[in-house]
């Protein structure tokens, strides 16, 4: 068995959909050595969309594949590398992160997770034939092509009802397939009442999809009544499935903070709870999942990733190039007793001015530096002199620091 090859990058992006490709474009353009790992097809779920009519800059609309091809070409222009393979595991908590695939291991200073998710499907016969050819998962994307037509919606939760109400602004008729009785529908009462009182919505209770029919395009959705087994063929232009969404986050469980539904939690800078690890696109806990919002996430993550890399590089260079001995004080500013120690360190800085370089690090604001300095406990004082280092984590006093300095 061949030994796994190891490749080093500045940035590794896991996922090559609209979010990952945009992150790659931004990272590559700034000169960062960048790799995108994509399990299946570059472009993600967007390539299944017959038409994207709401992405800025394309007034006549564009196919999902056409738009993603442009994203891909732009990323290649900025020398972004691609690997079509599945990620088997990750080690993200060290300064150099590792992404393991079946054949190789990739090391990176920054990891951007953009592996998205997948809509739940019904599993009914012929469904795979019409994905992107009449079966869709995005009403905002495909509502406008259904003006004056009949559409079918699968699902009975809040999302399915909300999307059905939205579709009535375009379609003449919305047939909603719900697996439950009216009194057991799993959405809010307000939404249920709005749907029941909307003349454009017809609800088929206690039904599931039996199979799909058509030629090159979907023509009919055949529903099956769970109580009578009766089949009901509904001619339609589009079938919208809103039965849930599954984020691809299994390999990040117990590593990265997530919601109870498996979406990764980030701040507005796309940062996760691990320094140097970002999450973008549909995998992230967010309100709107669209190509344009995924692209926005990717841009934001790459810009902040570049700043993170520059900050770390500057810090390392500063410590390595300094010829004077140094004293580094790492503390947590929200701890009152540690703030009192800060006063002592600042006093020593004045006393030893010109003899020692002093670094004051607030771990509350820069937690990742603990790992870089190999600090296991806070507060901590690191004394560097004559090529050696001493770290004090207990009984930090001025006298003790000066005693250690004298012996080094």
Image (tube, rainbow, N blue to C red):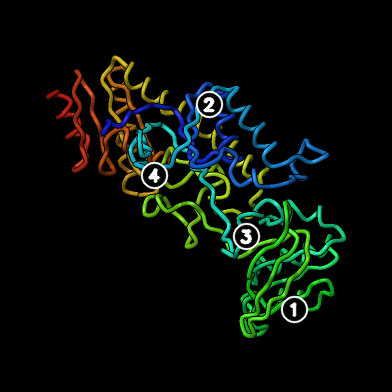
Nearer the viewer's eye, disc 4 or disc 1? 1
CB under 8 Å between discs 2 and 4: no
Gap between marks 1 and 3 measured at Cα:
33 Å
Gap between marks 2 and 3 measured at Cα:
37 Å
Q: Percent from the top left, x then y, of residue 311?
A: 45, 28
Residue at which label 2 appears: 80
Please report the residue visible at 37 percent of the width from the left and 50 percent of the height from the top: 255
Disc assigned to residue 333: 4
Gap between marks 1 and 2 measured at Cα:
51 Å
Sequence-first tag of 1 and 3: 3
Q: Percent from the top left, x then y, of residue 37?
A: 47, 36
Gap between marks 2 and 4 measured at Cα:
40 Å
Residue at which label 1 appears: 193
State how many labels appear: 4
Nearer the viewer's eye, disc 2 or disc 3? 3
Given residues 269 and 391, the one toward you in this image is: 269
Q: Quadrant of residue 6?
A: top left
Outermost residue, right direction? 148
Decide if residue 301 is in sight here: yes
């Amino acid at each position: 068995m061949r030994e796994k090859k190891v490749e080093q990058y500045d940035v590794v992006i896991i996922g090559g959909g609209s979010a990952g490709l945009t992150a790659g474009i931004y990272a590559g353009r700034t000169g960062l050595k960048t790799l995108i790992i994509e399990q299946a097809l570059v472009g993600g779920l967007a390539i299944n969309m017959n038409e994207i009519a709401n992405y800025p800059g394309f007034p006549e609309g564009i196919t999902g594949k056409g738009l993603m091809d442009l994203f891909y070409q732009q990323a290649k222009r900025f020398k972004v590398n691609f690997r079509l393979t599945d990620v088997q595991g990750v080690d993200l908590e060290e300064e150099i992160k590792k992404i393991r695939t079946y054949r190789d291991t990739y090391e990176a200073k920054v990891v951007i997770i953009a592996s998205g998710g997948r809509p739940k499907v019904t599993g009914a016969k012929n469904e795979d034939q019409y994905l992107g050819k009449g079966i869709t998962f995005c009403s905002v994307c495909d509502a406008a092509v259904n003006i004056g037509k009949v559409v079918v919606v699968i699902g009975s939760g809040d999302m399915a009802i909300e999307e059905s109400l939205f579709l009535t602004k375009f379609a003449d008729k919305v047939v909603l397939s719900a697996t439950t009785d009216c009194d057991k529908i799993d959405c809010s009462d307000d939404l249920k009442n709005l749907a029941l009182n909307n003349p454009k919505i017809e609800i088929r209770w206690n039904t599931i999809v039996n199979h799909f029919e058509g030629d090159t395009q979907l023509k009919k959705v055949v529903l099956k009544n769970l109580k009578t087994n009766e089949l009901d063929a509904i001619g339609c232009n589009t079938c919208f499935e809103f039965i849930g969404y599954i984020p691809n986050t299994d390999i990040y469980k117990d590593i990265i903070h997530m919601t109870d539904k498996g979406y990764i939690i980030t701040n507005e800078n796309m940062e996760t709870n691990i320094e140097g690890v970002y999450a973008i696109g549909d995998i992230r806990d967010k309100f709107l999942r669209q190509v344009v919002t995924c692209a926005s996430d990717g841009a934001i993550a790459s810009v902040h990733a570049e700043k993170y890399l520059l900050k770390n590089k500057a810090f390392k260079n500063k410590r390595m190039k300094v010829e004077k001995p140094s004293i580094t004080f790492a503390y947590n500013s929200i701890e009152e007793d540690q703030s009192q120690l800060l006063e002592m360190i600042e006093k020593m800085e004045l006393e030893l001015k010109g003899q020692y370089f002093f670094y004051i690090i607030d771990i509350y604001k820069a937690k990742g530096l603990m790992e870089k300095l190999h600090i296991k406990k806070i507060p901590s004082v690191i004394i560097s002199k004559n090529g050696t280092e001493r770290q004090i984590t207990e009984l930090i006093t001025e006298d003790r620091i000066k005693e250690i300095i004298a012996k080094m």
